[in-house]
Image: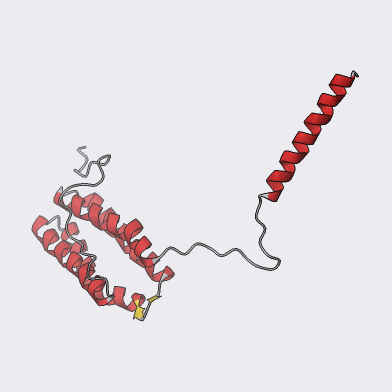
Amino acid sequence: MSLKAASLALLTGIVTLSLLGLGNAQTPTAPQGSTPQSYRPGLGDLMTMTVQPRHTKLGLAGQEKNWIYAAYELHELEESFERIVRVWPTYRKTNIAELMAATTKEPMDAVSQAIKSADAARFNDAYGRLTATCNACHQSTERPFVVIQAPKASPFPDQDFRPVKP
């Protein structure tokens, strides 16, 4: 092997080992015996990521009288509330589990009945009560500046909320 080839091979090996060493040096290590902390989204994060879009989509489905989709979104909204209760059973001094159960059961049941009967007027009334419940909850948890309303337009331009024609 020529001196030039041997020098190139040596240089390539040094660069490769250096890069491997840098990669290992940049990998954080957890202290011995500690478990990495799992992500716990804030209550506001969960409301924005899970509840608010479901509430909006439920309202849009009801406006379009798409009862199948409205039933789906109502179920998704219920699951969003359940997730919040699992992650934040207590927020500050408020028992979120009790608050959710006490405030959402009646309006959610009314929305469900309106969907089952495909009654737009009943839906609008029940959805209005559900929305008012959201705002009352925000008031009681010292977040009166978070005001929820029925959607006036869709923030989901890539989704059609009208019922599917057979």
In the image: residue 122, left or right of residue 155:
left
- Direction left: furthest residue: 121
Is residue 109 visible to the viewer in this orientation of the structure?
A: no
Quadrant occupied by the N terminus? top right
Relative height, residue 107 to residue 57 (above, below) = below
- Direction top: furthest residue: 2
Is residue 140 visible to the viewer in this orientation of the structure?
A: yes
Q: How was this image coloured?
A: secondary structure
Quadrant occupied by the C terminus? top left
- Direction bottom: furthest residue: 93
Splitting the image into 4 quarters, where does residue 91 fall?
A: bottom left
Residue at 69% x, 68% y: name it.
Answer: 33
Q: Position of residue 159 (x, y in %)?
A: 26, 41
Q: Position of residue 99 (x, y in %)?
A: 30, 76
> In terms of depth relative to the viewer, which is nearer, 45 or 3?
3
Splitting the image into 4 quarters, where does residue 3 fall?
A: top right
> In terms of depth relative to the viewer, which is nearer, 144 or 12?
12
Residue at 23% x, 41% y: name it.
Answer: 160
Splitting the image into 4 quarters, where does residue 75 fall?
A: bottom left
> In terms of depth relative to the viewer, which is nearer, 54 or 29?
29
In the image: residue 98, left or right of residue 119:
right
In the image: residue 117, left or right of residue 5:
left
Residue at 14% x, 59% y: name it.
Answer: 123
Q: Position of residue 108 (x, y in %)?
A: 23, 66
Residue at 85% x, 21% y: name it.
Answer: 5
Count every numbered label the image shows and give the total: 0
Relative height, residue 94 to residue 50 (above, below) = below
